Image (cartoon, rainbow, N blue to C red):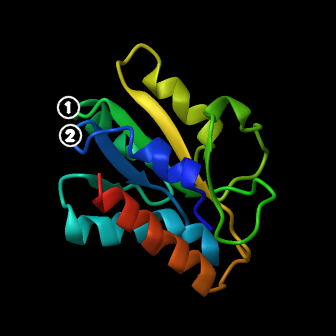
Amino acid sequence: MIPSEVAQELQKYSSEDLLAVGIGNELRGDDAIGIYIARKGLERFPDKFIDAGMAIENYIFKILGRKEKVILLIDAVDFKGNPGDAAIIPLEDLKEQGFSTHTLSLGKIKQFFIGSEKELILLGIQPENIALGSEMGESIREAGDRILDILGSI
């Protein structure tokens, strides 16, 4: 479920100020949600989304060179919610982990933006299954579609 607080938080920003960056791993089921949202978003709003796949570090300079001041990172994050729940999560709250489905942990990504005028926001979607070779669940896909609708209304 997408709480109204998440929608309200996202709607604080104008479309001119917001760049959505989808992160994920297509080989791990629900972990592909960030990529799913980015690709669907690129179809509707080609200038407002980046599909960073598993390696956002490959897009840092492209992101830093953009005019948008707010970078919305979208990824599957286990915050102990129900599958498909969404939350705005401070990057400071992410624990450094020895294992990640990405080449660089989200907790370390913020270091690339120190000194820039960019505001980083993490929109986490609670996954259900990130097992290698699994498919993205329907509840996760539906959450992605609702998030796209919210972003489209900005």
| Circle 2 crowding by C-alpha within 10 Å: few under 14, some 14–19, many from 20 | few
Query: What is the CA distance from the residue labelled 2 to the residue labelled 1?
Result: 8 Å
Q: Which mark is residue 16?
A: 2
Left or right: 96, with 65 as reference point? right
| Circle 1 crowding by C-alpha within 10 Å: few under 14, some 14–19, many from 20 | few
Q: What's the residue at 54%, 43% (across, down)?
A: 122
Left or right: 140, with 7 as reference point? right
Q: What's the residue at 66%, 64% (across, down)?
A: 85
Query: Which residue is labeled 1 in the image?
Result: 67
Can residue 81 be seen here? The reply is yes
Tell me the element at label 1.
loop
Front: mark 2 or 1: 2
Above-or-below relation of 43 to 115 = below
Q: Position of residue 7 (x, y in %)?
A: 48, 53
Q: Position of residue 92 (x, y in %)?
A: 67, 29
Q: What's the residue at 59%, 86% (across, down)?
A: 138
Q: What's the residue at 36%, 34% (across, down)?
A: 70
Q: Position of residue 115 (x, y in %)?
A: 41, 13
User: Looking at the image, do the residues carrying marks 2 and 1 touch, with CB atoms under 8 Å apart?
Assistant: yes
Q: Amino acid at mark 1?
A: Lys
Above-or-below relation of 41 to 48 = below
Q: Which mark is residue 140?
A: none
Can residue 26 be seen here? The reply is no
Tell me the element at label 2.
loop
